Amino acid sequence: MAISGYVYAIGAAITWGIVYTIDQRILRGASPFALLFVDSLITIVILLPIFFLSRGSLQSLSGASTKTWVFIIASLILAALANFLIFSSIKTLGASHASIFEIAYPFFVVVFSYFAFNAVPNLYFILGSILMFSGAAIIVFFNG
């Protein structure tokens, strides 16, 4: 078991919690599309020098197949769409309520992995999904 993977995941969850809270404040006066655009530009400016200074990044993509590039492009488009949708949700519902629904993404990862890679979920994933949806329903319906 790679402890570092769990540390990264927890770090991502903490970081996303901070980002959602900040985004809610930004979205009071901005559209989700505007935030997505500025976010993407800033990300490019920050990461482009790191990408070019890191030899491994360029080399890892130099031999990529056409199929891999199709997946990369699909992933980028879907990530942009997901960010736009979550920004729209944060603007409409607020960060707390938007995050309750967005937390269901692990369930969809399991479903899509099953169909795309024949990864059969075990009982714990199914039970965890039921608990996630139940918890979200309790929060939404009783905290409305």
Image: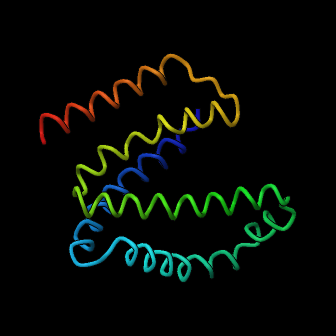
**Residue 137 point in image, percent of width and height:** 25, 32
Quadrant including the C terminus: top left
Total residue callouts: 0
* Residue positioned 50% across, 81% down in the render: 41
Q: Is 143 situated left or right of 92 in this image?
A: left
Q: Is 49 situated left or right of 106 in this image?
A: right
Which residue occupies the extreme top position in the image?
A: 123
* Residue positioned 31% across, 57% down in the render: 89
Q: Can you tell which quarter of the image residue 37 is in? A: bottom left
* Residue positioned 47% across, 34% down in the render: 107
**Residue 7 point in image, percent of width and height:** 47, 46
- Asked whether 26 or 53 is in front, the reply is 26
User: Which colour style is shown?
Assistant: rainbow
* Residue positioned 53% across, 79% down in the render: 46
Q: Can you tell which quarter of the image residue 58 is in? A: bottom right
Quadrant including the N terminus: top right
Please, is residue 12 above or below residue 46 in the view? above
- Asked whether 42 or 2 is in front, the reply is 42
**Residue 65 point in image, percent of width and height:** 85, 58
**Residue 66 point in image, percent of width and height:** 84, 60
Please, is residue 84 above or below residue 117 in the view? below
Q: Is 137 situated left or right of 110 in this image?
A: left
Please, is residue 141 above or below residue 66 in the view? above
Q: Is 26 situated left or right of 112 in this image?
A: left
